[in-house]
Structure formats: C-alpha cells, structure tokens
Amino acid sequence: MGPTKKQEQQWQAESDARTMAAYQEIISDNARKNRAIKEANRQAQDLNKRAAAMRQAATFKSTTRTPRKK
C-alpha cells in the first residue's frame, strides 16, 4: 500500500520548506542571485529555440512521395 494523503502532504510541506529556505539563501547573496538569473535567461533562450523548432516541425509538410502499396 502506498503513502497516505497525509504523508504526501507532509513530504510536500518538507520539500516546500527546503525550497523556501534555498530561495532565501539565493536572494540574500547578490552574486549567486545574478548567476541564477543569468542561467534562467540562458535556459529560457534554449526553451524558446526548442519551441521554435517544434512549431516548425508541427507545420512540416512532406514534399516527397512514397510509392503506394499494391
């Protein structure tokens, strides 16, 4: 039997508390915060490139014909 809903909520609360503590550490250290912002922008650019490639793939129309099976 898996974890109960109460256990899941407790684990989530513990994880969220760690996330909030990490956030406070990052925000209070300007050099670390600026590196994180720079990396977030780099990742966003990568995601935008990937999204553009996906949009292009979604509109792709094959120009080659395959022979029909008889």
Image: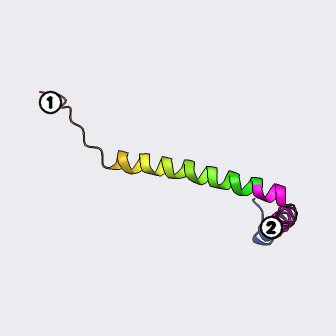
- Asked if residue 7 is positioned above or below residue 40 in the image, the reply reads below
Is 5 situated left or right of 68 in this image? right
Work out which quarter of the rendered image holds the N terminus and state it: bottom right
**How far apart are labels 1 and 2 at the CA level?**
57 Å
Which range of residues does the magenta coloring cover? Answer: 11-34
- Asked if residue 65 is positioned above or below residue 42 in the image, the reply reads above
Q: Which class describes the residues within 10 Å of circle 2: few (<14), some (14-19), or many (20+)?
A: few
Chief secondary structure of the magenta portion: helix
| Front position in the image: 8 or 33 | 33
Tell me which amino acid carries mark 2. Asp
* Residue 58 belongs to magenta span: no
Q: Which residue is drawn at 69% across and 53% down?
A: 38
| Residue 67 in the image, given as x and y percentages of width and height | 16, 27
State the residue position of label 1. Answer: 68
Q: Which residue is drawn at 78% across and 62% down?
A: 3
| Residue 40 in the image, given as x and y percentages of width and height | 67, 55
Is 42 situated left or right of 56 in this image? right
Tell me which amino acid carries mark 1. Arg
| Front position in the image: 16 or 42 | 42
Is 70 situated left or right of 37 in this image? left
- Asked if residue 37 is positioned above or below residue 70 in the image, the reply reads below
State the residue position of label 2. Answer: 16
Closer to us: mark 1 or mark 2? 2
| Residue 2 in the image, given as x and y percentages of width and height | 75, 59
Q: Which quadrant of the structure image shows residue 26?
A: bottom right
* Residue 16 belongs to magenta span: yes
Looking at the rendered structure, the secondary structure element under dot 1 is loop
Looking at the rendered structure, the secondary structure element under dot 2 is helix
Q: Which residue is drawn at 24% across and 38% down?
A: 62
| Front position in the image: 4 or 63 | 63
| Front position in the image: 30 or 2 | 30
